[in-house]
Amino acid sequence: MNKFIALTRIQLKDFIGRYSEGLGVKNKKLASILILFLVALIIIPNINLSFLIYRALARIGQGHLLITNSYINSILLNFFFGIPFIVSVFFFSRDARFLAALPVREDSLVLAKLVAVYLYLLFLSFLLMFPGLAVYLYNTGMGVYTVIMAVLVLLLTPLLPMFIVTILILPFANIFSNSRHKRTLILIFNFLMIFAIIGIQLFTGNLVENPARMEEVLVSGSFLELIGRGFPPGIWVTRIFLGSYRDLFLFLALNILLFFILKGLAGIFFRKALLSFSEDRGNSRGEIYYKEKSLAYHLLRRNILIIIREPMFFLNTVLSMLAPLLVVIIMLFTGELSLNLLQSPRLEPYLLLIVSIIMISPAVTGNISATAITREGKAFWETRVLPIKAVDNIRYRILTTIIFCLTGSLILLLITLVVLPLTLKMIIIAATFCLTVTLFLATIDILIDIYRPILNWTNPTAAVKNNLNVTFSLLIRGVIALIIYLLYKIWPGIFANIQWLMVLGSIIFLLLYLLLRSYLYTNGVKRFNRITI
Amino acid sequence: MVKIIQIKGVTKIYDDGKKAVDNLNMEIKKGEIFGFLGPNGAGKTTTLRMITGILAPTEGEIYVNGYNISREPLEAKRSFTYVPDHPDIFSAISGIDYLNFIADIYGVPLKERKEKIEKYARDFEIYAALPKMISSYSHGMKQKLLISAALLPEPEIFILDEPLSGLDPKSSRILKEFMKEHSKKGGTVLFSSHILEVVENLCDRIGIIKDGVLIACDSLENLKKHSDSSLEDIFMELTEDE
């Protein structure tokens, strides 16, 4: 047992360390405040939403369905987040070889790793379920029984998705052991995850905005039965709060059973996942060749490959750039948006504005430059020690961002062209605006990374996701949006002529870019040369 | 003899306040093999990183081939190649991609690079692995790739941090031969090592650093002048805590 505790402790320290590392904040107090702030940022709107859902459901006497909704949302989120996390913990784990050699039982090793997965999923469940449970208890009264049940349900929620994901992943173990397949599968699972998140948000939003639709489903047949037939734990959890001991027993029995099945599967998981990691031999990528290429080619290729070959970087880049497109596609699927609405003549005066916003979205949401140096991690020493000018080193990182962003903009423009009746003039104006915005944002973002690069990361997620550089970068965008909004409020006249506005915007962003560029290639270069590895 | 590396009053204090190197003064002459010794955490890697421009000194100046590494980094860097203690390299490319990259950066002509890559890769027995992704290489293979890449441009100065760690006996021997050959041709080799026997047999001069302070810097003969002890004894005596 002591060995298991020691193993679990190490896994948890590693797990927490990875996230703290990503924040890049050395001050522990500041890091804690930041985490609490981020948690509050997610929970507060969720509490608000839960109140709205509860009110909508309570009107038809079905307030307890808030529990069902929160539970199912949590299960879905845990499921889709669990897949990449379990894959990364077992198939990308750098400690696999070290752990496999320890004189510890196989199931202890696997269970210690699953504890880290459990805590991660518990945290996610907390973000989604706590608001629902709290609002329900607030409205129905907090008895000792309901509070205990709320804690119990919250603690047990991650077990079911963890079990399902584990079972689902096992058959793919052989595929995962090949590094190329690993990347592809991680990408697919992450895309599914994003679809699930956006889907949940739209589903919940729809529920709040249109309680009548919900009422129809609820009145026509029992909604609980509907869910229960497809997913019985959903109905058990809800009925627990209505005082059903039978459902409490069923829910507990299921989770105990799942725990023992997971424990039983630990051996297979150990051999198929942890050990298969060591069997990856890498693939031959062609012939031995001798070719002369330019510095520009090498540096651009290097920076592009850093993004493409690391699934987390690639996914982060593509998803953040094309997130608006994903939202539109899902909204079209769910009927929130229709082609008729997009092609409506009422939109005609705003077409230039719409296409301009669509085209700049990769640069606005992408913030690739904000982690351009950070992404290189410990390999950054190479470009520092080689006789390469700092100016070139920076220039090709910015160019990489511009290539990615403009490719995204071009894809979005082509899709927009199919949907919206755009003129050549509109395209030229929007493209010019997009180019200047992209240049400006790519430059300001790399300055952020020059001033606070995080090179000693061990987990790529830390480099691009929970990285404060990205927060700063988004903050700058927020400030720009606020300035534009204030200008609109103070001086609405300048927004009357959109064409003129876009040209003026292009000139302003071009001037800002030139100013920043001159700062970057003087002070920025000096700072770049002082980056410590 | 021409001083190819000059370290003048160099101090390095890290952000956490730790003084890794304290007022270091050292000169390395052209054509010599210089061994840099010291216990773990003595400041060897920090010193080598400052010489190569990876780290900026807090105080003092470093000249490589007459160029100040902080003020004229490009000119200074053209004079040397470097092999770090940990082979943390960009691993999403193949070995041959990496060697072509280094050859292009240092301007090694096609014919010459083909001959050299074949020679070094075959000597270090990584030729067959060259088309494979670096991420699939073992620690030793990465080390061999880095050494091959560092030898490729035939630099004036060859700087290596713990180059023998992770190398098999055959590759270690080949590397030692390359170092000797390089020195014979007038090139300079600066390397750190824990293997005293190698340093004893290979180096013209030795520097011993402890707690960031250079406590000895001379030829082995001069260090041994006052006793018949081995380098190991001298090292132990000098680095022993009082």
Image: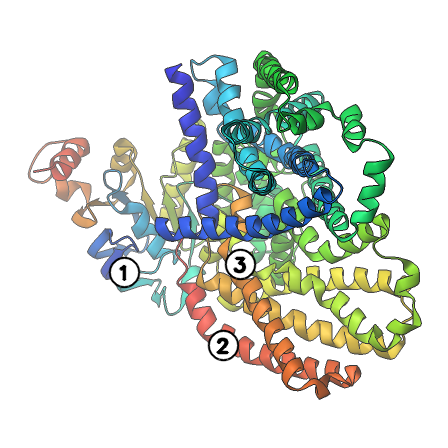
- The x, y position of residue A253, in whole percent, is 61, 14
Q: In this view, does B82 lie above or below A477?
A: above
Q: What element carries label 1?
A: strand
Q: Is residue B75 above or below residue A222?
A: below
Marks 2/1 in contact by CB < 8 Å: the verdict is no
* Mark linked to residue B6: 1
The numbered mark, 3 or 2, whose residue comes first in the sequence reads 3
In front: label 3 or label 2: 3
Q: What element carries label 3?
A: helix
In front: label 2 or label 1: 2
Q: What element carries label 2?
A: helix
Identity, as a three-letter code, of the amino acid under mark 2: Tyr
Gap between marks 2 and 1 measured at Cα: 33 Å
Gap between marks 3 and 1 measured at Cα: 43 Å
Residue located 64% across and 65% down the image: A399
Residue carrying label 3? A471
Q: Chain under label 1?
A: B
The answer to which of A118 and A225 lies nearer the viewer is A225
